[in-house]
Image (cartoon, rainbow, N blue to C red):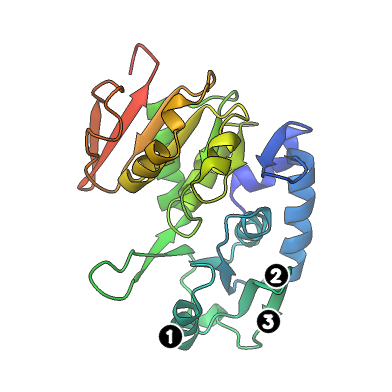
Amino acid sequence: MAPSFVEALASGGDAPALLFPCRAVITYCELARRVGEQAELFGSEKRLIAIEACLSEHAIIAYLAALKRGHAVALLPPGDVAAVSRFEEQYHPDIGFRRIGKRWRTHHSGIPSADRLHPDLAVLLSTSGSTGLGKFVRLSEKNISANAEAIVQYLGLTISDRGALILPFHTGCPSSIRIWQRAPASSFQGSPPLSPASSRAFQNRCTNLAGVPYSFELLEQIGFRDESLPDLRMMTVAGGKLSPKPCPALPQPPVQRRQGTVCHVWSDRSDR
């Protein structure tokens, strides 16, 4: 069964859903249509689908399409040939969705995996591999949805929010996509790797962004502090201790601990 937020994509109508630099805005209606078309290519029987997780509309649409048909999705780091080879040797995915040249292709291996996939398996996410090779963590639809729901409620995300995608898709973005969909008709601004260009992308009415400590060090280097961003109301960081040096002008954040990870939140909301 497809997650309810995937089935409800079209209800967002002509509201913007995805915005990427130098690309036309993708509305909810268009997103629903493209997700449906890609879902047809993936088929209806549960499969393991390996997606090259570039931060692009194509990868996001493929991810949503796989969820729509109840497939299990593995998000692989883009351009990492060794990581893809290791995954294919170990897990033998049925379907690969990746960029070949300048086009995105769906490739069927012809090796069915339905009999070896747990019915609740929704997403495989790789760990960072900081202590060796990354390992894949298995997540169910309930795991991801419950986490996203909790974050939406805690941060008070609403229909007017627009999140900036600056983290790699194969790490933090799958959860971000769920969070986005839990705030109906909100939208996402895709950003290139942190650079002066990405700083300009934040000016497109982004209200919040999430990063890791290094993200904020890079933002400081590109002059993010000097930008005029009247719509930005919240920044969150997780994945390690944030040095007070990169953001000395920001107030001391409240701290929330979840499963051993510290999440700092800066917000202009008086109740946070």
Q: State left or right for residue 88 relative to residue 23.
A: left
Q: Count the marks: how many?
A: 3
Where does the image place residue 270, in percent across and percent down from the top left? Answer: 35, 11
Task: Specify whether residue 43 is in view.
Answer: no
Q: Quadrant of residue 127?
A: bottom left
- The correct choice, above or below, for 202 with respect to 250 in the image is below
Look at 63% across and 77% down and name the residue there: 95
For this orientation, the residue located farthest to the top is 270
- Badge 2 crowding class, 10 Å Cα cut-off, few under 14, some 14 to 19, many 20 or more, is many
Quadrant (top left, top right, bottom left, bottom right) of the C terminus: top left
Identity, as a three-letter code, of the amino acid under mark 3: His
Asked whether disc 3 touches disc 1, contact meaning CB atoms under 8 Å apart, the reply is no
The residue to which callout 3 is attached is 108
Q: State left or right for residue 239 relative to residue 89.
A: left
Look at 58% across and 35% down and name the residue there: 200
Q: Secondary structure at mark 3?
A: strand
Look at 67% across and 42% down and name the residue there: 18
Query: Which mark is first along the chain, 1 or 2?
Result: 2
The residue to which callout 1 is attached is 90
Where does the image place residue 268, in percent across and percent down from the top left? Answer: 40, 16
Query: Which mark is first along the chain, 3 or 2?
Result: 2
Where does the image place residue 142, in percent across and percent down from the top left? Answer: 44, 51
Identity, as a three-letter code, of the amino acid under mark 2: Phe
Identity, as a three-letter code, of the amino acid under mark 1: Gln
Q: CA distance from mark 2 to mark 3?
A: 9 Å
Query: Which mark is first along the chain, 1 or 3?
Result: 1
- The correct choice, above or below, for 154 with respect to 94 in the image is above
Quadrant (top left, top right, bottom left, bottom right) of the N terminus: bottom right
